[in-house]
Image (cartoon, coloured by chain):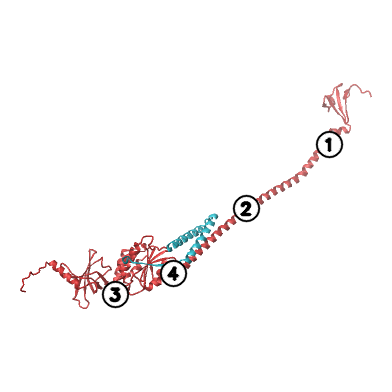
Amino acid sequence: MAKKSTTNFSQAFDELEQITEWFEKGEADLDEGLKKFERGLELAKVCKEKLSEVENKIKELKKKFEE
Amino acid sequence: MSTPEIEPVLQVSEYLKLANQVLKLNIDGYTFAIEGEIFDYKIKDGKWIMFSLKDENDPAAKVGCFATTFKVSGVFEDGMRVKVWGPPAITKWSNFQIDVQKMEAVGDGTLKRAYELLKKKLEAEGLFDFARKRELPRFPSRIGLITSRDAAAYGDFNRILNNRWSGVEVLFIHVHVQGREAVPEILAAFERFNLLPEKDRPEVLVLTRGGGSLEDLHAFNDEQVARAVFGSRIPVVCGVGHERDESLCDFVADVRASTPSNAAERAVPNRLDVIFEIETMTRQIESRLLDTLSDRQNLVDRVTQLIFSAADLQKEKFERLAKNLFDRVNTWLPRLSERLNTSVRVLASVDPKRVLERGYGIVTKKGRVIKDAAELEIGADIAVQLSHGTFDAEVLRVNGKGKMKLV
């Protein structure tokens, strides 16, 4: 569960970074820009929600020889 | 001895075997250590370690020692004070020696020296090379933690981790961070993490403990532990001691943290920084989009303006042409009418009818107008046109010749 949500965080963050880069390159395609803008806002929201929701979990593992 | 008994006879090798058994039964080499100073330290074929230990208080007392590089890690040299553990043994050549299972430097001076020598050796082997240091994942989802649950380091690490970041699964393996069990337990923890199936494996390992004396930190300066850090296929963050402390594991680790808290800081980003970054990116794409929009608006404005001004230009040009035309016509028309009037006047003045009206007549012969009387012969028929009506006549006399006028 923790794995899943944070992987999503990492992916969402990466995608947001790519969108920002796309805009920084100054490609002026308005239609695509609008789409990417909407996607960017969505990703930012997802990332922020993940950050406010999830807790860290501690799970103790036994050493090999203790099993 | 009255009863005849067969006296036992042992072969030399049997005798040595017996003596060794007796020694091992009576001297348990694992429950105590023998302390002394190394001399005649030699490593043969890179495997066999041979040296003697001597007693500081009694320089004449010495004992031979034998070990292998598999069992004894670290670097030693003559003059170092060490503790050794291991059973005694008598060799085939009747040399008495300690079969060393474990060896540790003793005293700050020796520890420091051993540490320096080992550090130099590992460095020369490339264990500290920056080129091999791996980057940590930016947002790890699973962290393997190796420390003691009883140490302050454990609490510090998890507290800072929780303060900074969330959604991480911390897989924790409890180990002793000092004492006899420390080295084997840390080695086992590294093995355990590295042998996990890839889907369960942490993306980063954190090996940490609080500060301590060189002796307390021995596990983190142990050659085997340093090699385990080096050999780990999972990147390692090592945070040992306080700010000033260093350990060999620190140098080998992919990321060197100064304290357990700092290890948490190096392992995960700060939530607030990331939120700020997300907000910055959002603002950035928003303002870029607005830029694009206003660029578009400007373009449309500019084109519209161009079209209008082109139309204006055309209209202006047309009006100018029309005005020119009218101007021309206006100057040209009166002259034209004047000329027309003149022509009309001229034409009117030459109209033969007007001459006839004044009483003249036009004489024609066979339709030809006669302007000279000499063209006529007497008796010719002529026609005369007057202003009103015509009549025919016969020529009687031309220039005084012919029939005389009777009147």
Examine the rendering and report whether any part of residue B138 can be seen: no
Tell which circle, 2 or 1, labels the residue nearer the N-terminal end. 2
Q: Amino acid at mark 3?
A: Gly
Tell which circle, 4 or 2, labels the residue nearer the N-terminal end. 4
Q: Could you tell me how far apart the alpha carbons at marks 2 and 3 are, in whole angstroms?
A: 88 Å
Determine if marks 3 and 1 fall on one subunit: yes
- Which chain does the residue under circle 3 lie in? B
Determine if marks 2 and 3 fall on one subunit: yes
Q: Which mark is residue B162?
A: 4
The reply to whether the C-beta atoms of the residues labelled 3 and 4 are less than 8 Å apart is no
Percent position (x, y) of residue B166? 45, 67
The reply to whether the C-beta atoms of the residues labelled 4 and 2 are less than 8 Å apart is no
Percent position (x, y) of residue B251? 35, 67
Q: Which mark is residue B398?
A: none
Picture colour for chain B? red
Q: Could you tell me how far apart the alpha carbons at marks 4 and 2 are, in whole angstroms?
A: 61 Å
x 59%, y 55%: residue: B299
The image quadrant that residue B382 belongs to is: top right
x 38%, y 74%: residue: B152
Q: Amino acid at mark 1?
A: Ser
The reply to whether the C-beta atoms of the residues labelled 2 and 3 are less than 8 Å apart is no
Q: Amino acid at mark 2?
A: Leu
Determine if marks 1 and 4 fall on one subunit: yes
Q: Relative to A31, is B145 on the left or the right?
A: left
Tell which circle, 3 or 4, labels the residue nearer the N-terminal end. 3
Mark 4 is surrounded, within 10 Å at the Cα level, by few (under 14), some (14 to 19) or many (20 or more) other residues, namely some
Q: Could you tell me how far apart the alpha carbons at marks 1 and 4 are, in whole angstroms?
A: 125 Å
